[in-house]
Image (cartoon, helix red, strand yellow):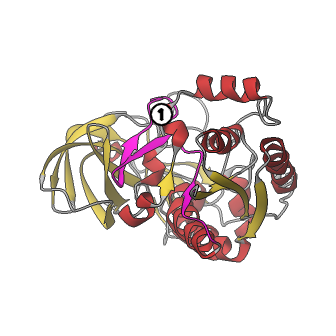
Amino acid sequence: MAKKVYVGMSGGVDSSVTAALLKEKGYDVTGVYMKNWSQDLPGFVCPWKEDYQDAKRVAVQLGIDFKMYDFEKNYRHKVVDYMVREYKAGRTPNPDIMCNQEVKFKLFLETALEDGADLIATGHYSRIKDSQLLTGLDDNKDQSYFLYRVTEDALSKSLMPIGEMHKTEVRALAKKLGLATAYKKDSQGICFVGKVGIKEFLLNELGSQKAGPIIDQKGKEIGQHDGAIFYTIGQRHGLSVGGGLPYYVTRKDMVANTVYVTTNLDDRDLWTERVELEDVHWINKKPADGKYQVRLRYRGPLVECELKGSKLNLAEPQRGIAAGQSAVLYDDDRVLGGGIIAGR
């Protein structure tokens, strides 16, 4: 008897092809649209209805069962409230990582298994082998950074078939199969609100923020910011201080509502050689202290490092590392886990 797989179908091309591949392999496939967010924002219409319909169209094309799980309340509590709380604390969180940890590979997995599934599947560009997480074969699309907080148990019950493919192959297969999403553009912006930016989202959640001083490396006030919450370490754009050399954010004082900047790219406050991790998560067993590679932001370079307990010594200093971001450890193409970057 064929194993039952519930595929998280977002209405995009990647999850559509995932469902098609698994059906082709002989699995008993059910498509599931996770309704995580439906709220419209000023000037932005939430695309959830369109995405739901696109996912449903593909399910009809493939001749598979299709259903919707409403996770909106849980999503608000586990992902959105977490993100807002972190920004208010002056940190830079990654909601996509929390979404994978709490929703896709926990809530969705548990709900699907209770509903009769044997396995779940997603359209992530990563690979699973023996309950270990590996990078996707397409280096340009690899999403393993976002998955480092998934558990070994969840991986043992999950499939990620397009991790073995390149994006161009996925698109080509979608076109060959005539899938309704074959030409649909990839979603941009925050994982749950489409094209809206972080600043616009936070303004909608928290309202306008108190202005405060922007101080340069000489201690001189060079302008006013519109809320320290909106700025992140290393940021160059959006400072509105104009003229001359570009300014980079070096630190923030949330209590004093002050943003500190520099024009000096060699400024010590811009660079990090040692990273302290908190809320550490290892996918399989804890790795021994030693030399690995670390990624300190999505699409950031892999940096040689030495792990000592919950501390990382970087082989080369890195610029603009912000508290609240994730440091993800790799041993070649295997994802070991990682942690949240603590404040300096």
Q: Amino acid at mark 1?
A: Glu
Where 111 falls versus 67 (above or below)?
below
Residue 301 x %, y %: 36, 34
In the figure, is residue 67 to the left or right of 259? right
Residue at x 71%, y 77% (from the top left corner): 73
Residue 164 x %, y %: 48, 33
Q: Nearer the viewer, residue 100 or 114?
A: 114
Residue 4 x %, y %: 60, 59
The residue under label 1 is 164
Q: Taking the image as drawn, is residue 136 in sight? A: yes
Q: Nearer the viewer, residue 206 or 98?
A: 98
Instruction: Tell me the element at label 1.
Output: helix
Where residue 241 sits, quadrant-wise, is: top right
Farthest front residue in view:
1
For the N terminus, the image quarter is bottom right
* Neighbourhood count class around disc 1 (C-alpha, 10 Å): few under 14, some 14–19, many 20 upward: some
Q: Nearer the viewer, residue 219 or 157?
A: 157
Q: Which span is picked out in magenta?
A: 116-141
Residue at x 49%, y 64% (from the top left corner): 101
Q: Nearer the viewer, residue 264 or 201?
A: 201
Residue at x 55%, y 37% (from the top left corner): 162
Residue 118 counted in the magenta span: yes
In the figure, is residue 59 to the left or right of 157? right
For the C terminus, the image quarter is bottom left
Counting the numbered discs, the total is 1
Where residue 175 sits, quadrant-wise, is: top right
Where 179 falls versus 295 (above or below)?
above
In the figure, is residue 208 to the left or right of 281? right
Residue 103 counted in the magenta span: no
